[in-house]
Image (cartoon, rainbow, N blue to C red):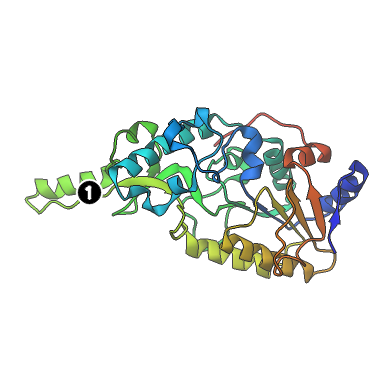
Amino acid sequence: MSESHQSNDDLQLLFQELRKKTKIVIVAGAGISEAAGIPEFRTRLNAAEGKDNLERCKYITKDMLDAFAFSDDQKTKQFMVMTRELSQTFSSARPTAFHHFIAHLAKRGQIRRLYIQNIDDIDIKIHPLATEVPLSLKGPWPNTIQLHGSLSKVCCSKCSHIDDFRQTDFQGHQMPSCNQCQAYSEARSSRGMRSLSIGKLRPRISLYSEQPWDADAVGRVSVADVRASPDAVVVVGTALKVHGTAKLVQELCRATHSRRQGICIWLNIDCPPTGSNMKKCWDFVVLSRCDTFARLYGIKEEPVITF
C-alpha cells in the first residue's frame, strides 16, 4: 500500500531512509527541468498564430519531434528552428535544486544510476553526473544514462560520426552536411577515385516513432542494474508514458522489493499511473514539486563546474 507523504515530519522520516541507501536508481523526466525554464514536449502549438519561437511559447508539439520531421522542406525548416531555439534555451539553463539533490547523492556514493529522459544536458553540467557519448556496450558505465539522447550532439546519417551541435549549422531548409564525409569524399576524388555521397547531420536525439540511440548499451546497463537489486528507486518528473521506460521502472521496483528494506518512491505533482502493472510499485507517493522536495532535504544550489 502506498503512503502519501505531504507533511514535513513525514518527509523527514522518508529522508532518513534515503540517507541510509547506497544503491539508489533515479528515473527522471521533464519535471526536474521545469524550474530551469525548459518547455515540456506535450501540447500542440497553434501554428496559425506563428508560435514557433520558444521565447513565446510554453510547450513543443509532439509532431515537431516525430521521425517524419525530415519528410519535406517545410517540416525540416520547422524542426531546425525548434532545435536552434531549444539549443539556446538549454545552453543558458542552470541546474535546479533537484539536479543538485541528485549530484549530492552521487558525491556521497549513494547513486547507482540516473536514467534521464531529458535531452537538455542540464544534469551532466554537474561533474558527478557525467555521461559518455556514445554509451559503451561494456561497463563500467557512467552515473548518467541518457535514454533519449542529447541535443548537444549531432550524428551523421551515413558514417555515424558524432560532433557537437552548432546553432549556426542549423539554418535554412536543409540539414547540414557531414564534414567527415565531405573530407573523405574529396580525398578520394583527389586520388582519381569516385566521389561518395555525403551524409547529413541531425541532432542525436530520439524522435517519436524511432529506435532510441545506444539502445543495446542502455539495455545492458538496465539488465545489470536490475540484477544488482537497488536499495531505492526514485521516479520523478515523468508520467511514464513511454513503454520502455515504464517497463524499466517495473523491473527496477520488483528487484528493489526483493531485498530487505528496499523502497520505491513516486515524486511528482501528479498521481502515479493506475495501471495494474504499476499498482504494487510504490512504497511512498510524494505529491510535491521536486525542487521543494530537494530543498526540504537540505539541498542548497551550488556553483556549477562543467567539464
The residue lying toward the viewer, choosing from 107 and 283, is 283
Q: In the figure, residue 278 lies in which quadrant?
A: bottom right
- State which quarter of the image contains the C terminus: top right
Q: Residue at x 65, y 43 (%)?
A: 31
Say whether residue 124 is visible.
yes
Tag 1 residue? 198
Give the mark count.
Answer: 1
Which image quadrant: the N terminus? Answer: bottom right
Residue 121 in percent (x, y) is at 55, 41
* Closest to the observer, 158 or 135: 158
Among the 4 quarters of the image, the one containing residue 30: top right
Residue 137 can be seen, yes or no: no
Question: Does 85 sit above or below residue 230?
Answer: above
Percent coordinates x, y for residue 219 in the rendering: 54, 65
Residue 61 pos. (x, y %): 49, 44
Three-letter code, disc 1: Ile
Left or right side of 161 for 221: right
Q: Residue furthest front?
A: 48
> Where is residue 215 drawn, in percent x and y?
49, 62
Which residue is farthest right? 9
Residue 33 placement: quadrant: top right
